[in-house]
Image (cartoon, rainbow, N blue to C red):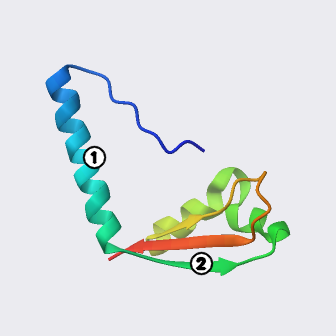
Amino acid sequence: MKDEITIAGGKETVAKVKARIQNTYEERKRNCQSISVEIPNNQHKYIIGPRGQSIQEILQETGVFVETPPPDVQSETITLRQTS
């Protein structure tokens, strides 16, 4: 569950790609709506599904990103995000 991106290549190309990624991130951040819901930890596995399949289906069908806490964190908060 890393939230980092590695860019390899020539110095100028890397700078251009980095700027484009940062611009995309900032644009989506401005247009993103989110809501947090409390769901018991023992139910998270049903939302995630086998190998994350249920989360991918939700994204494909609705355009909503489902963020669950890491398994080692005892949080019941699941965040739903959608870009407008």
Where, quadrant-wise, is the N terminus in this rendering? top right
Residue at point 78% right, 51% down? Answer: 72
Query: Residue at coordinates 54% horizontally, 73% vertically from top-left?
Result: 80
Query: What is the quadrant of residue 29 in the picture?
Result: bottom left
What's the residue type where badge 1 is placed?
Ile
Numbered disc total = 2
The residue furthest right is 42
Crowding around mark 2 (Cα neighbors within 10 Å: few <14, some 14 to 19, many 20+) is few
Q: Earlier in the sequence, mark 1 or mark 2?
A: 1
- Image x and y of residue 73, in percent: 76, 56
SS class, disc 2? strand
The residue indicated by pointer 2 is 36
- Horizontal side, residue 28 vs residue 50: left or right: left
Q: Is residue 51 above or below residue 33?
A: above
- Distance between the alpha carbons at the discs numbered 1 and 2: 26 Å
Label 1 Cα crowd, 10 Å radius (few <14 / some 14-19 / many 20+): few
Q: Position of residue 37 (x, y in %)?
A: 65, 80
The residue at the point 77 percent across, 62 percent down is 45
The residue under label 2 is which amino acid type? Ser
Residue 49, image quadrant? bottom right
Asked if labels 2 and 1 touch by Cβ distance under 8 angstroms, the answer is no
Which residue corresponds to mark 1?
21
Residue 3 point in image, percent of width and height: 50, 45
Locate residue 18, reporting x and y percent. 25, 39
